[in-house]
Image: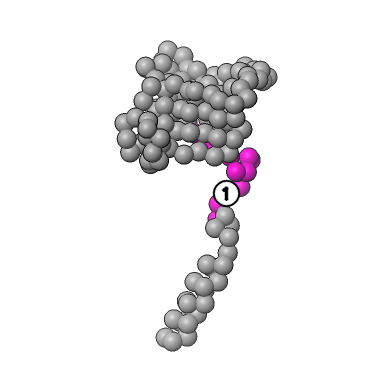
Amino acid sequence: MKFFVFSFGIICWLSSLTSPAACQEPSTQAGRLHFSFPFPGGFHGRYELASSNAQWVASDGRPVCAGCMGDSILQLRGDVEVVTVVCGPTGDECHKSPVVLRADAIDYNETTGKLQARGVVHTVLTQPQHDAKYKASK
């Protein structure tokens, strides 16, 4: 019994020395954070956002957790990309827009659905994917 307890203690100690990322799945874009939000006002589609850093803040700038307040803002910083996915009236067939918005920083207001871009801001036209269809967000 003492050997079992001692072995368990050694295993726990050794596992604390391993990297926390050892159990994470590899990502195609290391260090990128991805978010998806439905369009406001009942429009069929969603915003797909990606950035290097992100934090949720209240409208007065205080840090909050996601969804904790009714008027929270997602602050995206560092190589931010915004892609829109537009769906048909039934919402079952969706297409990704070939226009990508890129900016140094973007604030996304979860309540209104408005995006405010800052820094160097530009759009990029990507190759349209005519056959690519995406599932509608629920």
Specify the quadrant of the image occupied by residue 105.
top right
Name the residue nearer the viewer: 41 or 64: 64
Q: Is residue 108 visible?
A: yes
- Quarter of the image with the N terminus is bottom left
Residue occupying the point 54% across, 39% down:
53
Residue occupying the point 37% across, 17% down:
41
The residue furthest top is: 89
From this view, report whether residue 1 is shown above or below residue 36: below
81 relative to 45 in the view: left or right: right
Residue occupying the point 47% across, 76% down:
8
State the extent of the magenta-drawn residues as a range. Answer: 23-35
Name the residue nearer the viewer: 67 or 64: 64
The residue furthest bottom is: 2
110 relative to 54 in the view: left or right: left
**Secondary structure of residue under mark 1:** loop
Identify the main secondary structure in magenta. Answer: loop
- Quarter of the image with the C terminus is top left
Specify the quadrant of the image occupied by residue 30.
top right
The picture places residue 25, in percent across and down from the top left corner, at: 57, 49
The residue furthest front is: 60
Q: Is residue 72 visible?
A: no
Name the residue nearer the viewer: 87 or 13: 13
Q: Is residue 101 magenta?
A: no
The picture places residue 87, in percent across and down from the top left corner, at: 47, 17
Residue occupying the point 37% across, 32% down:
60
The picture places residue 45, in percent across and down from the top left corner, at: 46, 20
Inspect the image, locate mark 1, and give the three-letter code of the amino acid beneath it: Glu
Total tally of numbered discs in the picture: 1
The picture places residue 77, in percent across and down from the top left corner, at: 55, 35
Q: Is residue 24 magenta?
A: yes
The residue that label 1 is drawn on is 25
